[in-house]
Image: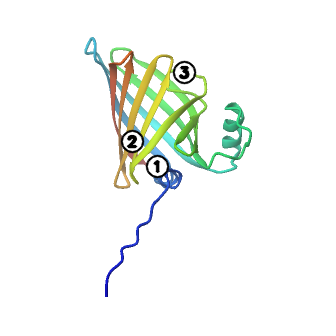
Amino acid sequence: MTFQPQIVELNPESLVQEFFQRSQGNWRSQRRYYTLKDGEAQEVVSIITVRLLEQGSEELIQLARLHEMPDETILTCGVFTSWESNYVGPSPKQTTGSTVFGVLGTALYRDRGFSTTKPIIAKFSMRDPKTMCLRTEYSGNVFEEEVKLIGTQYRTRQTIISRAGEEQMIGQYLEKRIG
């Protein structure tokens, strides 16, 4: 008797939906941004809340409208993310905000970017079911990010921000599930 392995190919949309499901909840994020030119480091502590959005949810319909999509229910899944952040040392400040992410194929639609309030589109890939890689370009900047789930209680993130082909800043994050 010969063993025939069964190969199951998961599409990016099902992988990212599973990733978003695993990311739901509240997180304490500790991160540091390194400005490469001058060596300055900025520490930030945030409380982040991630909520899964199913296809057809009001938030995804609004996001599809914002991106002027002909079918308002085309986004297959997404997340609503909110944050409260405290910037420590050299430029202390507090910020709060939220953003909506919606998935279609390998595109991640957002209502805003990291450094813009305008709607943007990122490309994503799933290195494995626990690792999402993003690439976003706008205003002459390129943002490359990797988000990795570590077990059920931790996530790591790394962001590299480039302009004109030169790396400007690196952000490194450790996030722990809370509550």
Q: Nearer the viewer, residue 176 or 120?
A: 120
Q: Quadrant of residue 71?
A: top right
Q: Quadrant of residue 144?
A: top left
* Mark 1, other Cα within 10 Å: few <14 / some 14–19 / many ≥20: many
Q: Which is more foreground, mark 2 or mark 1?
A: 2
**Which numbered tag is attached to residue 23?**
1
Q: In this view, which residue lies farthest toward the front? A: 2
59 sits left or right of 85 in the view:
right
Task: Give yes or no for contact between labels 2 and 1 (Cβ–Cβ under 8 Å).
Answer: yes
Distance of mark 2 from mark 3, alpha carbons?
A: 21 Å
Q: How far across and how far down the image is residue 1, in percent?
A: 31, 88
Q: How far across and how far down the image is residue 119, in percent?
A: 61, 27
* Mark 2, other Cα within 10 Å: few <14 / some 14–19 / many ≥20: some
Q: Tag 2's secondary structure?
A: strand
Q: Nearer the viewer, residue 80 or 124?
A: 124
- Residue at horizontal 32 percent and vertical 25 percent from the top: 170
